[in-house]
């Protein structure tokens, strides 16, 4: 059974009387206990909104989010608050997500205090020290303020705060995007160690394909508020089906400059989420497009076990031929 | 063509390249941090993070020296043989 189930969720926003922004357009994601689901997408693809919906920080317009079988929006305020110890989040900008007036120790301990999980101050302090230890920070840093810390240390504080309540599920929203590659490697290793130690489930959101590939068991590719393709990590990378996935994978830079990657280019920019295309969201940009693509919405369809693709042209053209045809 | 990526010479270059995530391979993060710029320790600035640091590294600041054609490193280790596995040395 899935620990977290996002079922056909739709979320729109509107600022004043402005146009309606279609941020999330029917997303379904299931995450099992101990699993890492990676969500890849460009800026504006709706991936962070999915993270907030998963946490219950936003209410879906329709569809549901279930954690451990319970529908988040059906829960009372107090039940939902209780769930805050089971589901936590780590944000992209460590410094901006830490209260600059608080010491590291009180930042890390705060969830315990808010949740009333420990009765005595000394028990809170003990657990805060243990959380700092789990993220490999010196206990002496507990008295310091976030500004005294490096970016990597600040993100460790963010992670310590996220694990102190012993959660089962953590949303990692671009946790390494603002860190340099050496610090990123430290944080990724730490996250993976914490996962095996505590059996955590992760929703790992990022635009960085290499990072997501390294850490995820399964991956969803998001485009304009929809998942266009989802598969186990190796399947997705070995056999990308959706034209958007191919374009994304071909746009990545290899860490080895001698490896040349075949370019698969899309035309134009990502459309404005206030005006969704009538048919496939990639219509107008896709080199495989036929008339039918812009006529009606496209649903995710299974191409093999655990591998689903939202493209009506999948299967029409052999992937080898396609690559050959599109070679520039 | 052998270069800084396919045949890194300096221990720091090697460590940096190893810390780029590659699917299915373990990540080897760099240990430690960049040194304090105000209270700079003597010797090589990479000394405290380098597995191969020896006495000379603790005392003497390395300077750039050529190892093979068109390549130079700032490191006391004898890296010429290591790099030479792939390329001819400078005359």
Image (spheres, rainbow, N blue to C red):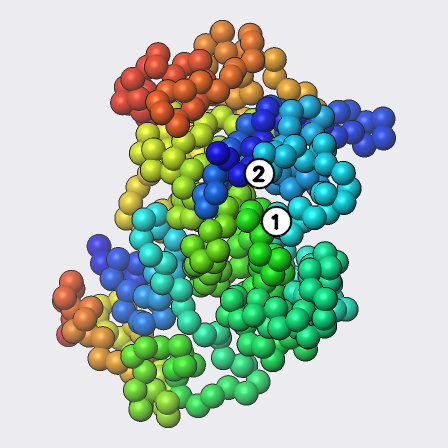
**A183 or A196, which lies in front?**
A196
Asked if disc 2 and disc 1 are in contact, CB closer than 8 Å, the reply is yes
Percent across and percent down for residue A191 are 48, 56
Q: Does residue A113 lie above or below A323 as drawn?
A: below
**In the rendering, at what x and y percent does residue B13 appear?**
35, 67
Label 2: few (<14), some (14–19) or many (≥20) C-alpha neighbours in 10 Å = some
Task: Specify the subunit that label 2 lies on.
Answer: A
Residue farthest to the right, as pictured: A16
- Quadrant hosting residue A268: top right
Residue sitting at 76 percent across and 38 percent down?
A76
Percent x, y of residue A267: 50, 25
Residue count near mark 1 (Cα–Cα under 10 Å), binned few <14, some 14–19, many ≥20? some
Please tell me in which quadrant of the rendered image residue A98 appears. bottom right
Q: Which residue corresponds to mark 1?
A: A86
Measured in 3D between alpha carbons, the distance from the residue under mark 2 to the one under mark 1, in whole angstroms, is 10 Å
| Residue at the spot 57% in from the left edge and 38% down from the top edge | A68
How many circles with numbers are drawn on the protein? 2
Picture disc at residue B24: none
Q: Nearer the viewer, residue A301 or B41?
A: A301
């Amino acid at each position: 059974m899935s620990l977290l189930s996002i079922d056909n969720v739709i979320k729109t926003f509107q600022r004043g009387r402005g146009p309606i922004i279609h941020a999330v357009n029917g997303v379904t994601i299931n995450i099992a206990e101990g699993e890492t689901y990676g969500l890849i997408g460009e800026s504006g693809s709706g991936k962070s909104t999915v993270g907030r919906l998963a946490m219950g920080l936003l209410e879906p317009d329709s569809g549901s989010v279930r954690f451990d079988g319970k529908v988040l929006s059906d829960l009372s305020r107090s039940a939902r608050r209780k769930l805050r110890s089971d589901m936590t989040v780590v944000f992209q900008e460590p410094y901006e997500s830490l209260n600059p007036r608080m010491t590291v120790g009180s930042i890390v301990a705060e969830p315990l205090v808010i949740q009333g999980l420990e009765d005595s101050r000394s028990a809170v302090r003990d657990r805060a020290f243990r959380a700092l230890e789990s993220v490999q920070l010196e206990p002496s840093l507990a008295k310091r303020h976030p500004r005294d810390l490096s970016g990597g240390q600040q993100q460790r504080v963010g992670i310590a705060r996220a694990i102190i309540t012993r959660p089962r599920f953590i949303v990692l929203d671009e946790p390494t995007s603002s860190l340099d590659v050496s610090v990123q490697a430290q944080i990724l290793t730490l996250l993976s160690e914490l996962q095996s130690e505590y059996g955590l489930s992760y929703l790992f959101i990022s635009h960085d394909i290499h990072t997501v590939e390294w850490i995820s068991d399964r991956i969803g590719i998001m485009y304009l508020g929809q998942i266009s393709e989802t598969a186990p990590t190796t399947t997705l990378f070995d056999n990308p089906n959706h034209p958007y996935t191919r374009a994304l994978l071909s746009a990545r830079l290899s860490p080895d400059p001698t490896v040349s990657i075949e370019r698969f280019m899309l035309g134009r920019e990502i459309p404005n989420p206030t005006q969704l295309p009538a048919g496939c969201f990639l219509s107008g940009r896709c080199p495989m497009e036929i008339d039918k693509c812009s006529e009606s919405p496209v649903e995710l369809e299974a191409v093999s076990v655990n591998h689903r693709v939202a493209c009506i042209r999948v299967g029409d053209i052999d992937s080898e031929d396609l690559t050959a045809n599109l070679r520039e | 063509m052998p270069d800084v990526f396919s045949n890194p010479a300096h221990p720091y270059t090697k460590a940096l390249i190893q810390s780029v995530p590659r699917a299915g391979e373990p990540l080897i993060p760099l240990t430690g941090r960049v040194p304090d710029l105000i209270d700079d320790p003597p010797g090589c600035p990479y000394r405290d993070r380098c597995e191969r640091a020896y006495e000379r590294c603790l005392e003497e600041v390395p300077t750039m020296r050529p190892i093979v054609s068109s390549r130079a490193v700032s490191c006391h280790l004898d890296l010429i043989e290591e790099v030479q596995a792939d390329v001819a040395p400078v005359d």
